[in-house]
Amino acid sequence: MAETPRARVGLISDTHGHLRAEIFQALAGVERLIHAGDVEDVDHLTDLAAIAPVTAVSGNVDRVDVRAIAPEEAVLDVAGVRVAVIHGHQVHPDYRLLLARFPDAKVIVHGHTHVPRCDAVGDILIVNPGAAGKAQKGHPPSVAILEVAEGVPMVRHLRLESRVS
């Protein structure tokens, strides 16, 4: 009998040039990283690749060096589950537009608002891992873990320390 694909993926967004040491601990052991934009320091994508391969999209504040290697959106397969990634400024404030933009996705990862969330819309998850850089809008810095088992995606947010390292 064939084994069902499983995956553990780190979700990160809005680092804004602040790559905290806690990120490396929180995301240790993931098989892939997804960065949902507003990186600001292109070298941070290389630093994150020390954890796992990185799929990144560019955000509204990313300069040309980040945009050269991070497209505006990405779609990938995670253990048989279609995952779409976009920063989110393109649809802000109506994130329901993401459903029309990515009709085949089972998980849509975005950033931009700096607010951690995981909303189920039918069988689709819309996920914002929160801002991993500085605490903003009353929310501490955070990342998230996407786990897929037997074709079912689940998301868990991880709070990071509140000081910038």
Image (spheres, helix red, strand yellow):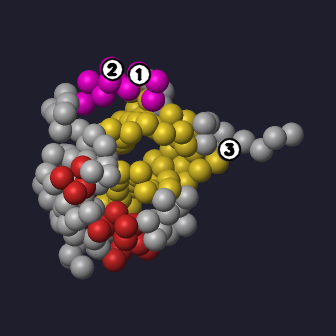
Task: Tell whether 140 sits left or right of 156.
Answer: left
Q: Is residue 132 above or below residue 92?
A: below
Residue 140: quadrant of the picture:
bottom left
Residue at image position (32%, 52%) is 69
What type is the residue that disc 2 sits on? Ala
* Magenta segment includes 104: yes
Q: CA distance from mark 2 to mark 1?
A: 5 Å
The residue where tag 1 is placed is 103
* Local secondary structure at mark 3: loop
* Spot occupied by residue 119 in the image (x, y as percentages of width and height): 36, 36
Image quadrant in which the N terminus is located = top right
Image point (38%, 39%), residue name: 74
Residue on which disc 2 sits: 100
Mark 1 residue type? Pro
Cα separation, mark 2 vs mark 3, equals 27 Å
Mark 3 Cα shell of 10 Å, populated few (<14), some (14-19), many (≥20): few
**At which x and y percent is residue 156?**
44, 53
- In the image, which residues are magenta? 95-105
Residue at figure coordinates x 22%, y 57% from the top left = 65
Q: Are marks 2 and 3 in contact (CB under 8 Å)?
A: no
Q: What kind of element bears circle 1?
A: loop
Relative to residue 36, is residue 120 depicted above or below?
above
Q: How far apart, in angstroms, are the residues tagged by discs 1 and 3?
A: 23 Å
Characterize the local packing of mark 2: few (<14), some (14-19) or many (20 or more) Cα atoms within 10 angstroms. Answer: few
Mark earlier in primary sequence (2, 3): 3
Q: State the image quarter where residue 126 is shown.
A: top left
Q: In the structure shown, which secondary structural element does the residue marked by tag 2 occupy? A: helix
Residue 6 can be seen in this image: yes
Amino acid carrying label 3: it is Pro
- The numbered mark at residue 5 is 3
Q: Which sits in the foreground, 122 or 82?
A: 82
